[in-house]
Image (cartoon, rainbow, N blue to C red):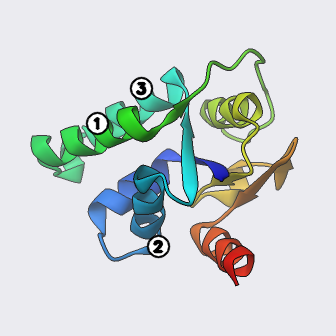
Amino acid sequence: MIRAILDTNIIVSALLQSEGLPARIFLMAISGTAMQLCVSGEIYAEYEEVIRRPHLKRSDDEINAALAAIREKGFWVRPMVQVQACADPDDNVFLECAEAAQAHYLITGNLKHFPSTWSQTRIVSPRQFLEAVAEMEG
């Protein structure tokens, strides 16, 4: 099974646009069939803080359902190594989680904030991820 971390922008995009690529990826993640969503406490806290921002205009039911799905379906890890490799220091928690989970992919809408790979983790856009999955299945 593919282990992947979703950057917060993927979660937000999935909640804002149900037809987009991030939404397809989020549904794959919470279905737990082809992909295992890897999450740490710090990442979960960031997801929660960001999707509760009033300007995103998401209902409490929608927010609570998304967070419950992440809690229940997520593969929880506790990173043991601190990383300082991202252009935005707040993004280092995603690399820390990737390392702890031995994730195959970190999926982000902000590739410029990350190195192209981290340890064994490929850092990809939603389109790149879905193309890679299609190749594996093909």
Question: How busy is the neighbourhood of tag 3: few (under 14 within 10 Å), some, or many (20 plus)?
Answer: few
Q: Position of residue 60 (x, y in %)?
A: 12, 40
Cα separation, mark 3 vs mark 2, equals: 23 Å
Mark 3: which amino acid?
A: Ala
**Residue 50 in the image: above or below residue 77:** below
Q: Quadrant of residue 17?
A: bottom left
Q: Position of residue 106 (x, y in %)?
A: 67, 50
Disc 3 and disc 2 in contact, CB within 8 angstroms? no
- What secondary structure is marked by label 1? helix
Residue, far bottom: 138
Residue 21 - label: 2
The residue wearing badge 3 is 45
Question: How busy is the neighbourhood of tag 1: few (under 14 within 10 Å), some, or many (20 plus)?
Answer: few
Residue, far right: 119
The residue wearing badge 1 is 68
Q: Which residue is rendered at x = 41% and y = 55% of the image? A: 31
Q: Is residue 90 left or right of residue 122?
A: left
Mark 1: which amino acid?
A: Ala
Q: Is residue 34 left or right of residue 16?
A: right
Q: Which residue is rendered at x = 65% and y = 79% of the image? A: 134
